[in-house]
Amino acid sequence: DAKTTQPNSMESNEEEPVHLPCNHSTISGTDYIHWYRQLPSQGPEYVIHGLTSNVNNRMASLAIAEDRKSSTLILHRATLRDAAVYYCILSKGYALNFGKGTSLLVTP
Amino acid sequence: DAGVIQSPRHEVTEMGQEVTLRCKPISGHDYLFWYRQTMMRGLELLIYFNNNVPIDDSGMPEDRFSAKMPNASFSTLKIQPSEPRDSAVYFCASGLKYEQYFGPGTRLTVT
């Protein structure tokens, strides 16, 4: 599977938007882009996924670059509950290889 | 739906003992996954099933580990014999096409 690169950590203020970047320059045409997050002491939680077009759901938005070599997870209004490790994963199928992710700190 | 159910939530056992972890997936999901998470290695996929059939077990660390899915509502991950290096949090997840839903995990400590 192609590799992703994410910042180790990011910080945001509560009630502000958060843009979490992910680089995947070796992505193939059949790779889906998945985002999961893991809150402290919990199992990972599905956030969103996409292939080519931008995607929106109740939790977040996924913006995919036109060349698909990068993507951004957008949390429109961060809350304290959004503090978690966010994983950007590429997968052709169902097997997911979690990397180290980005640790998001949300401050009041 | 209650979500993915795992039992036990915590397990402490001695080296050499057999350990069985259990998982009840979300009804209607046709994929089931077993993962292991440690500080050193992060979150690793061990094995996954589709319609109760094992599809990829390349992540199973060695022959001491085995997983079964006798029906659509139950799966087990067995370690026999257990070793201290097996200490980790084991997650079960179930899913449909491209979304996986994780259970709360079983924290295994092997002394």
Image: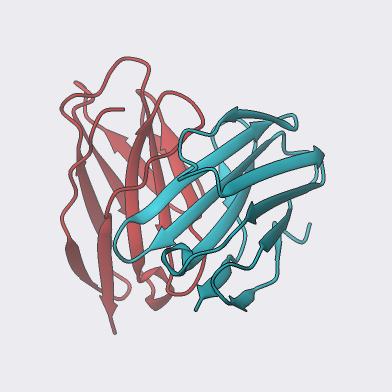
Image quarter hosting the C terminus of chain A: bottom left
Residue A23 versus residue B35 in the image, above or below: above
Please name whichever residue, A107 or B102, is drawn nearer the observer in this view of the structure: B102
Whole-percent x and y of residue A59?
47, 54
Instruction: Give the residue drawn at x 35%, y 23%.
Output: A52
- The reply, left or right, for residue A45 in relation to residue A23 is right
Colouring mode (rainbow / by chain / secondary structure / one colour): by chain
Q: Position of residue A53 (x, y in %)?
A: 36, 25
Position in image of residue A19 (x %, y %)? 23, 54
Q: Nearer the viewer, residue B26 or B71?
A: B71
Shade of chain B as shown in the rendered figure: cyan
The quarter holding residue B2 reads bottom right
- Can residue A77 be seen here? no
Q: Which chain is red?
A: A
Residue B57 x %, y %: 53, 34
- The picture quadrant where one finds residue B3 is bottom right
Q: Is residue B73 left or right of residue A16?
A: right
Q: Is residue A51 above or below residue A34?
A: above
Name the outermost residue toward the front: B16
Give the vertical position of A1 relative to A9 (above or below): above
Residue A48 seen in the current view: yes
